[in-house]
Image (cartoon, rainbow, N blue to C red):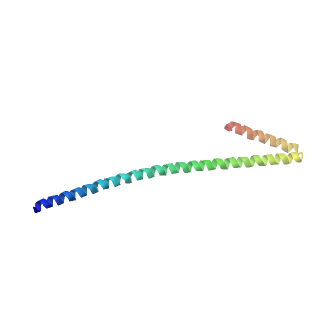
Amino acid sequence: MEASGDREGNYVIDFILHRLEVELGKKREKTREMAEQLRADGAALEALENKRLMLMNERDEKLAEKKAVDKLVFDFLEADDNMNFVAQRAMLNRIVDLMSGDAARGV
């Protein structure tokens, strides 16, 4: 009878080992999937950061352009108040240049 008990004990141990191997395989697969998702999320985050930097650069360029146009308008109105027609003419030429630059960019 002792041999029969040993065999049953071995079956139980083998069953437990098999279950542990199955669970370990599941954990490894889950870890692999999570690592893959982490890489994908990292790439997506980097793409979003690049887009954010591009948009910030565009914003800064537009703000600088607006500031230049606002100054030009202010100077033009000031020249108008002072009846400085030479300065007005130069500013009109500058406005035309700015507008043609916008037209060339498709704005």
| Residue 59 at x, y percent in the picture | 65, 48
Quadrant (top left, top right, bottom left, bottom right) of the C terminus: top right
Q: Residue furthest right?
A: 83
Q: Quadrant of residue 88?
A: top right
Horizontal side, residue 54 vs residue 3: left or right? right
Residue closest to the far front: 1
Q: Is 105 placed above or below 59 here?
A: above
Of 104 and 6, the residue lying toward us: 6
Q: Residue at x 81, y 43 (%)?
A: 91
Task: Give coordinates of residue 41: x percent, y percent.
Answer: 48, 50
Numbered disc total: 0
Q: Residue at x 74, y 39 (%)?
A: 99
Q: Residue furthest left?
A: 1
The residue shown at (11%, 60%) is 3
Image coordinates of residue 9 in percent, x first then y, are: 18, 60
Q: In the rendered view of the protein, which quadrant contains the N terminus? A: bottom left
**Residue under the image location 85 percent in, 48 percent down:** 78
Outermost residue to the bottom: 2
Q: Position of residue 14 (x, y in %)?
A: 21, 57
Residue 41, placed above or below residue 6: above
> Vertically, is 7 above or below 70?
below
